[in-house]
């Protein structure tokens, strides 16, 4: 019996010794190869005997990242797979690609008119807008990356954009109000009032307690805030109290400062004015007022909802009544927000149609008749973008992500493949092209957050169009010289049961040349 125990013990010791050392092979194995080209980046993978990629060894490395030897370039493999586990004993193959001068250039942004260039802020939705003196527009916006922002937009200037404030906002505010004085911007976020300088963008403390506010309006050096049923009028910039309008009508949702007093829209669609007391302003019986905003002089703009489901933007005077009207067309959608300028007959209106959020700046004609569009920005939902009839469309089930491309001949290896299937991919490290089994070939962008990609190729000349979208815009890139890829063989590796590895280069594997 003692002899049997000794035999079992020796067997267990030998079996343990036959396992690979912890962390992989005892010594990393050197992988040597001759580059199939004079320049470019190298992607190299380790494949098992079934042809499955188990390790991305080199991810778009430049030549200077390799050791340079007499027999070409060299790197090492530690015997681990991509999960960090030791590869089992067996035969492995190393092969890859040299990617040459493939050009990547931005072509266009689709389905989001706010994004005009790579320098534009990535606005994914607008919560409120307010015209500024001189024709600029201040936007309370949500940017890609779960950011809230105040953005200044100049529709008639080449220097279009200036982002005043950005902050992390994983969850958008349920209710946003925006007002501007001559020097400050006021934002009402879920009942809390905040302020920032229009020029500096620096946040300015608002003296006092300004929680649970329902509406805000500003004009020149005056500010009006509705809180707990009272509208408080403040002088700026010192926020001194100049008066109050108590016992406001119930459920006021929107305020507009006049030269004298204020007008207000209630949730039930009624319209009110305060001068020395609250009085109701008569409106057509088949309409409901949903929002108000200041106009030139003592005029004001109101957003009117009709019983037939339509909407209109009306310019009004407390004494003269209705002065002008703009009504969205049948294809424009319905208005849901309005913001006017106290300096010129200019207003910004938010319009909603199925899968489209639209923001339009409109100016009244010089003769007081007609309307002129200053800008028209649309965000079209493109979560399921794709192709239809050869065109990019915001929703389609046709989403090509793979394409077959011809490769440059490897003059050092006549058996090297001459074509390759590439795939468009997206992930936490960005977007790009890989082989069908996942070996990275070309990074397009390093930005995460793109849920959908598409690849469309052209044969003459060999190029492709790469599309990436996050649901609120689709970016298009042109890939030139797509065929400048060369395949190469980096030899084989034998891992034995003891974790020892032996590499045989491709040239050593090749049979001797015929005499």
Image: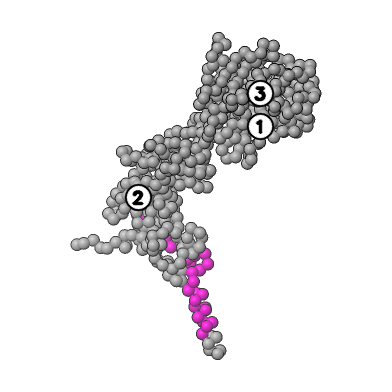
10 Å neighbourhood of mark 3: few (<14), some, or many (≥20)?
many
In the picture, measured across the screen, residue 275 lies left or right of residue 397, that is right
Picture coordinates of residue 247 (x, y %)? 80, 24
Q: Nearer the viewer, mark 3 or mark 1?
A: 3
Q: Is residue 436 visible?
A: yes
First in sequence, mark 3 or 1: give its number. 1
First in sequence, mark 1 or 2: give its number. 1
Picture coordinates of residue 89 (x, y %)? 43, 68
Q: Which residue is mark 1?
A: 176
**Image disc number at residue 289:** 3
Quadrant the C terminus occupies? bottom left
- Compare residues 322 and 481 and report the one nearer the observer: 322
Q: What number of labels is visible?
A: 3
- Pointer 3 and pointer 1: residues touching (CB < 8 Å)? no
Residue 20 part of the magenta-drawn span:
yes
The magenta stretch is: 7-33
Q: Is residue 66 visible?
A: no
**Image disc number at residue 420:** 2
């Amino acid at each position: 019996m003692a002899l049997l125990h000794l035999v079992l013990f020796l067997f267990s010791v030998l079996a343990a010794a036959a396992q690979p050392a912890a962390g992989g092979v005892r010594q990393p194995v050197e992988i040597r190869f001759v580059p199939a080209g004079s320049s470019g980046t190298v992607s190299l993978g380790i494949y098992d005997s079934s042809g499955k990629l188990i390790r991305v060894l080199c991810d778009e490395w430049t030549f200077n990242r390799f050791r340079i030897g007499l027999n070409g370039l060299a790197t090492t493999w530690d015997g681990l797979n991509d999960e960090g586990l030791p590869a089992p004993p067996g035969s492995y193959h190393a092969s890859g690609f040299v990617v040459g001068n493939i050009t990547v250039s931005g072509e266009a942004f689709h389905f989001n008119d706010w994004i005009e260039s790579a320098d534009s802020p990535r606005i994914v939705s607008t919560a409120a807008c307010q015209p500024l003196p001189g024709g600029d527009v201040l936007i309370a916006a949500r940017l890609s990356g779960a950011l809230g922002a105040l953005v200044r937009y100049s529709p008639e200037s080449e220097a279009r954009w200036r982002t005043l404030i950005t902050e992390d906002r994983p969850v958008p505010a349920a209710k946003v109000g925006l007002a501007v004085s001559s020097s400050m911007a006021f934002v009402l976020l879920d009942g809390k009032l905040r302020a920032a300088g229009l020029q500096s963008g620096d946040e300015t403390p608002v003296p006092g307690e300004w929680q649970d506010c329902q509406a805000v309006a500003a004009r020149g050096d005056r500010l009006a805030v509705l809180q707990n049923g009272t509208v408080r009028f403040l002088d700026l910039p010192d926020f001194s109290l100049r008066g109050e309008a108590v016992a406001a009508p119930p459920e006021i949702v929107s305020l507009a400062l006049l030269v004298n007093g204020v007008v207000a829209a209630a949730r039930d669609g009624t319209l009110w004015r305060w001068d020395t007391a609250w009085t109701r302003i008569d409106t057509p019986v088949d309409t409901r007022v949903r929002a108000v905003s200041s106009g030139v002089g003592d005029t004001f703009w109101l957003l009117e909802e009709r019983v037939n489901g339509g909407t209109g933007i009306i310019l009004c005077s407390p004494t003269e009544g209705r002065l002008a009207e703009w009504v969205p067309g049948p294809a424009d959608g319905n208005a849901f927000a309005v913001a006017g300028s106290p300096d010129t007959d200019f207003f910004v209106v938010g319009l909603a149609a199925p899968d489209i959020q639209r923001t339009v700046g409109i100016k009244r004609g010089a003769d007081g008749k007609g309307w002129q569009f200053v800008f028209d920005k649309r965000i079209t939902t493109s979560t399921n973008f794709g192709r239809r009839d050869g065109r990019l469309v915001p929703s389609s089930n046709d989403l090509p992500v793979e394409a077959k491309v011809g490769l440059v001949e490897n003059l050092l290896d006549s058996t090297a493949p001459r074509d390759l299937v590439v795939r468009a991919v997206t992930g936490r490290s960005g977007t790009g092209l890989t082989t069908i089994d996942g070996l990275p070939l070309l990074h397009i962008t390093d930005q995460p957050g793109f849920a959908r990609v598409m690849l469309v190729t052209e044969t003459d000349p060999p190029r492709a169009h790469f599309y990436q979208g996050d649901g609120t815009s689709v970016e298009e890139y042109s890939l030139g010289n797509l065929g400048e890829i060369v395949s190469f063989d980096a030899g084989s590796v034998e891992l034995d049961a003891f974790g020892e590895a032996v590499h045989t280069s491709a040239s050593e594997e090749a049979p001797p040349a015929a005499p």
